[in-house]
Image: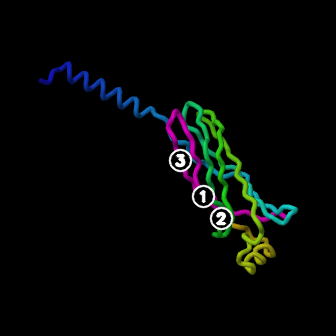
Amino acid sequence: MITKNNILKVFYLSSLLLLMTSCGPKAPEFTDLRDLDMFSLDDGNFVIKAEAVLYNPNGVSLTIHEIHVDVLVNGDKIGNVYQSVSSEAKGKSEFSLPLEVTFPPKLLFSNVLGGILNMATGEDFEVRYTGFIRTKVLGVTFKVPFDQVEKIGLSM
C-alpha cells in the first residue's frame, strides 16, 4: 500500500541521489596551445615546443597521469610525446603542460622540393597536435582529448 510517508521517503531519496550525482567531479577542459615554436639545433635536428593549457573546473586539485600527443607537420607524422607523469593542478585554475618533440629534418622535408620552397619563401609550417591527457579527480579518471592546428615559421 502506498502511503504519504512512503512517497516522501522516495522523494527524499531521489532528491539526495540527484544532488550527489550532479555534484560529481568534472573533466578538465583543453583551452589552448601557447608558445608554439620550431627551431633547429646545432646537431642538425629540429625541435617543436609548445605548452598545452587546460582548465580544472573542480574545486579540488586533480592529478595528471599521462600525456599522449602525436605531432604532424604539413600532414606528416614527425613524432609523438608520451609521458607518464604525476603532477597536480589546483582547483578552479588553468594549468599548462610542456610538450617537446625533436626530429631529424628528413621527416620535415619528406617532399624535398616542397621543403626547400617552404624554407626559401619563408612560408609557415602547419603543425597539428592531436592526442589526450589522462587526469584523475576524486578517484574518477578522465581522458581529455584535443586536436589543435597552428601555423609556425622556422627559426634558424
Label 1 to label 2, Cα distance in Å? 8 Å
Q: Residue at point 15% right, 21% down?
A: 3
Residues in magenta?
A: 128-156
Residue type (three-letter) at the residue carrying disc 2: Leu
Where is residue 112 drawn, in percent x and y?
75, 79
Question: Where is mark 1, residue-wise?
Answer: 130
First-in-chain label (1 vs 2): 2
Relative to 154, say whether 92 is above or below: above
Q: Quadrant of the N terminus?
A: top left
Location of residue 56 (image quadrant): top right
Which residue is more in the foreground, 141 or 91? 141
Location of residue 123 (image quadrant): bottom right
Residue 143's label in the rendered image is 3
Secondary structure under the numbered disc 1 in the rendered image = strand
Dots 1, 2 in contact, CB < 8 A: yes
Q: Residue at point 63% right, 33% down?
A: 90
Q: Residue at point 45% right, 32% down?
A: 23
Mark 3 surroundings within 10 Å by alpha-carbon count, few (fewer than 14), some (14 through 19), many (20 or more): some
Question: Where is mark 2, residue-wise?
Answer: 72
Which residue is more in the foreground, 79 or 53? 79
Q: Quadrant of the C terminus?
A: bottom right
First-in-chain label (3 vs 2): 2
Which SS type dominates the magenta stretch? strand
Label 3 to label 2, Cα distance in Å? 21 Å
- Does the segment drawn in magenta span residue 11? no
Where is residue 155 drawn, in percent x and y?
82, 63
The total of numbered circles placed on residues is 3
Relative to 99, say whether 5 is above or below: above
Where is residue 17 drawn, in percent x and y?
35, 29
Which colour assignment does the render follow?
Answer: rainbow
